[in-house]
Image (cartoon, rainbow, N blue to C red):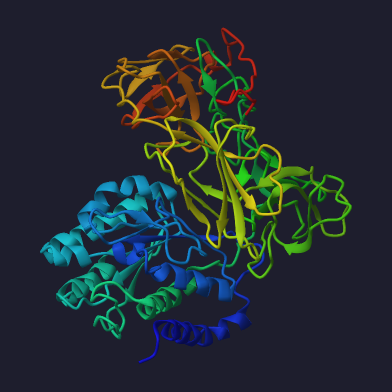
Amino acid sequence: MASSSFRRFLAVAIVLTSTLIFLLLDGNVYGQVPTTIMPLGDSITQGSSAWNSYRRALWQLFQITEESVDFVGSQDSNVNFTPPPDLVPPPDPDFDLDHEGHWGFTTAQILAQLPTWAAARPDVVLIHLGTNDVETGVPVATTINNLGQIIDVLRSARPNVVILLAQIIPNANFDVAPLNAAIATLVTQKYTAQSPVIRVDHYVGFDATAGVDTHDGTHPNDIGEIKMASRWFNALQPFLNPPPTTPPTNTSTPFVFPTITLTPTYTLTPLPTNTPTTTPTSTPDPRLMFQTAVPEVVDNPQDVRAIRPNGERIVDTIRPTFEWRLATGQRTYRLQVDNDRTFLSPVIERIVDGGIFTIPNREDGLPQGIYFWRVAPEGSEGWSEPIQFTVFIGKRPADGSYTPDHTPRFTWAYTPNVRTYVLQVSRDGNFTDLVIDARVESTTVYVAPEELPFGIYYWRVFPLGEPPFGNVRRMLAISPPPPPAPARIEAPRPGSSIGELNATFAWAAVAGAAGYEIEISDSLAFENPFAVTTTEPTFTMDQPIARGTYFWRIRSVNEYGVGGLWTQPQSFIVERPASAATETPTSTPTATSTATPDGSSG
């Protein structure tokens, strides 16, 4: 009998050979934003300490064909399959680990938590669900109803999401055929042109016998994983990196209110704007929050502006995407990236058709560090202003996140040709008080070997032999659970109208809360909200707000700055005569920097 290693080699070789034709297609399209894909399911999606799941084989197919994709999800771990399930790294953590696979979950359990996970707003969702329903005796009709609601929740977060719905793999212990027949009908019922639902048959041609396509009669072995990956891959082809559309020549630059501080102890983030109109009738008053902006028309062919990445955020991939605003009448651009703003020796210099470019998979990417980039129409020296950005491969825990686990797990992006990484965890942002200084071999996952007490920590990771750069790091709070959300909203009441210039928000105080976070937005999705933190159970706006309907929510925070659950969003309406909207505010906000827990400026 062939050895397990040989069978793995043979299986991978077969699939790689069968997909070589895609190499001729040059699958990674220059100037494309990565397609975000959420693998959603149970343990078959999650994988175990011994089996990667289909996700790794699928990721390898994307690398072969140079497709630009990004797996998304709240999970980045596999499971050990021994109750109670412990989260463990996959055996080969050399792929994009993000996913939404949950060991033992039924469709009802997935549905209960999906509203939170759907906030990732993926372009495509791969759903393989129902095995645990059949195993636990859930009626087929109930499972189908849950799957239909799962699709609805995903659409509520992203109306044009593409759903790939699996007819699930067979099981050696029970019959899944009735469920698969009902899934085929559900696909037809839920399909829309805006949000296609595509049936992916994982049942036919899959042998659930242990040792054939599964290792235990339920979960795929490496051959089964490759079969699943191939079928997902083929079904995904029409939806990967669609041809770019020509951007409009008239683009809008929203007015962004400066960061300000209000008494007693508030920290604010920039305000959102309403969706700009294409033909405004008047110039907005810059003193008004949430005011509609005037579209900016670019008539000068040399007036091109870089959009992302920018200096406000860290890029956690070595292959970032660059995007810029097109100038009128210009389609082809010259892109430069350098590690200093002189651009004397660019590390990237490309001619790009369109306004977006992603470093392709066949290239090494950018090492960790600080970079500058700019863009100009081809044949012109009218460069955009240089923008600084930082490449930092650390992924999780995310910056500003919280965990009650005293032995947190750290993950980072795979870097080609790097075998050993240095992971450091410190009590201060300057890394003078290290609690972990580890050398990590041949993996991008590290679990703290000893318990860390409650507190604020900073972490960073870098290849061995390359010094860390600057003060780039992620902040993590190891903290007890945060306090509950306020039980009562006092003002404004839901759906009420506000006529005053200075809106006041009030709520019931929460025992044990060190403070509160409030978000206000003109969108129920709270995209780019106006955010404030305060130590008191009340807050008054110092600026007038433009007329319209708004939503607000609040949560309590503990002494480590960890926030709990948000209250349900409450709406209010600002109704004010147009003349009143231009009155001089009672006080003028002042710009300020935001202090980070280590005392440095953010």
Please say whether residue 327 is visible from this viewpoint: yes
Foreground residue, 454 or 111?
454
Foreground residue, 377 or 457?
457
Q: Is residue 348 depicted above or below 309 in this figure?
A: below
The residue sitting at 54% across, 14% down in the picture is 262
Hey, which quadrant is residue 208 in on the image?
A: bottom left
Residue 381 appears left or right of 158: right
The residue sitting at 60% across, 10% down in the picture is 584
Residue 244 appears left or right of 501: right
Hey, which quadrant is residue 214 in on the image?
A: bottom left
Q: Is residue 538 depicted above or below 125 in this figure?
A: above
Q: Position of residue 279 (x, y in %)?
A: 61, 39
Q: Is residue 525 depicted above or below 45 in this figure?
A: above
**Number of numbered discs present?**
0
Please say whether residue 316 is visible from this viewpoint: no
Residue 84 appears left or right of 338: left
Say which quadrant the C terminus sits in.
Answer: top right
Residue, far bottom: 1
Residue, far top: 586
Foreground residue, 471 or 269?
471
Residue 226 appears left or right of 293: left
The residue sitting at 68% across, 51% down in the picture is 368
Q: Position of residue 505 (x, y in %)?
A: 39, 16
Q: Position of residue 76 (x, y in %)?
A: 43, 55
Q: Is residue 143 depicted above or below 505 in this figure?
A: below
Q: Position of residue 146 (x, y in %)?
A: 21, 57
Say which quadrant the N terminus sits in.
Answer: bottom left
The residue sitting at 55% across, 31% down in the picture is 427
